[in-house]
Image: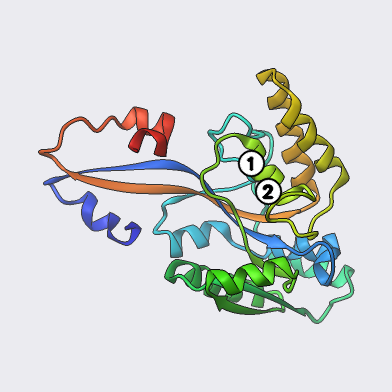
Amino acid sequence: SKSQYQEAKNDKNLAVYVSPVNHVRAMRFNLAKGPCKDIRVRQAISHAIDRRALIAGTEFGLGRIASCMYPEDHWAHNPNLKPVSYDLELSKKLLAEAGYPNGLTVKGYMYNTPIAMNWTEAIKHMLAQVGITWQVDSLDPVAASDRMKNLEYDFAGGGWVWIWDPDLMATGLYDPNGGFNYGRSHNEKAIALIRAGRKELNLAKRQKIYWELEKVLYDNYEDAWLFWEMWPVAYSKNVRGYNYKMVVRHKEIWSW
């Protein structure tokens, strides 16, 4: 686990590697109803999260600050996008402009796994610095799924794992027919790009579509993207055949 990384990397009997993984850890906004319908509230929440501190404090430094959904080494990632800045004064200003000069309360949920609970406490504390009270429940997957389906949240756990073809996540999260949308997001520009990307066969043209899609989602603060995963692995130095370059290139597929 990541908590054992520092100890393992100093063990002379172990060969320790850290590789990027095709996962994005993020938070989802309810854009259909509640305070997060206002982009200024979404901006305020996103600017109040210290992603660097989150990675250091909950991931033992093993993460890459995310700017949008596709990881930085994925062909569909738009390299022109920068991670949302950590800016408490800007966050407070945006809240005031949105009609919440004294702060506000948002409701949500997270999974009840140990690592998700760590993220919860960290983010809850960060939001409190700008006067946002996050009333968050730690739920099992079934209960969390019900909240997602019924849009019973303002700000909740999100993200995506195993990102290969870019359409699966884009459709799943942002297309009205996607399996994880349930009406919480309806961005016309994004929907048109998602459907264009699904039909396009030319890789260069398809890449441009997904770069534009990321820009559209980024500009609308459709979600609060936190970090792209990195995973450590350790082997006894007696083990032979671990090809780190191929793991970095092909991720989990090579490992399997």
Which residue is at the front of the view, 160 or 11?
Answer: 160
In the picture, the quarter occupied by the N terminus is: bottom left
Alpha carbon separation for disc pair 1 and 2: 6 Å
Q: Do the residues labelled 1 and 2 touch (CB within 8 Å)?
A: yes
In the picture, the quarter occupied by the C terminus is: top left
Residue at 74% in and 46% down: 218
Relative to residue 160, is residue 123 depicted above or below?
A: below
- Give the color scheme: rainbow, by chain, secondary structure or one colour: rainbow
Residue at 86% in and 41% down: 189
Q: What element carries label 1?
A: helix
Q: Answer few, some or many: residues within 10 Å of disc 2's Cα (few below 14, many 20 plus, some between 14 and 19).
A: some
Say which residue label 1 marks. Answer: 168
Kindly tell me whether residue 145 is visible in this rendering. Answer: yes
Which residue is at the front of the view, 147 or 126?
Answer: 147
| Residue 172's disc number | 2
Amino acid type assigned to the residue bearing label 1 in the image: Leu
Left or right for 16, reference 199: left
Residue 11 lies, in percent from the top left, at 16, 51
Instruction: Indicate the quadrant where residue 100 lies.
Output: bottom right
Kindly tell me whether residue 129 is visible in this rendering. Answer: no
Residue at 31% in and 32% down: 244
Q: Is mark 2 on a helix, strand or loop?
A: helix
Relative to residue 243, is residue 151 depicted above or below?
A: below
Amino acid type assigned to the residue bearing label 2 in the image: Gly
Residue 133 lies, in percent from the top left, at 69, 80
Left or right for 59, reference 162: left
| Residue 246's disc number | none
Residue 116 lies, in percent from the top left, at 50, 68
Instruction: Indicate the quadrant where residue 51 lies.
Output: bottom right
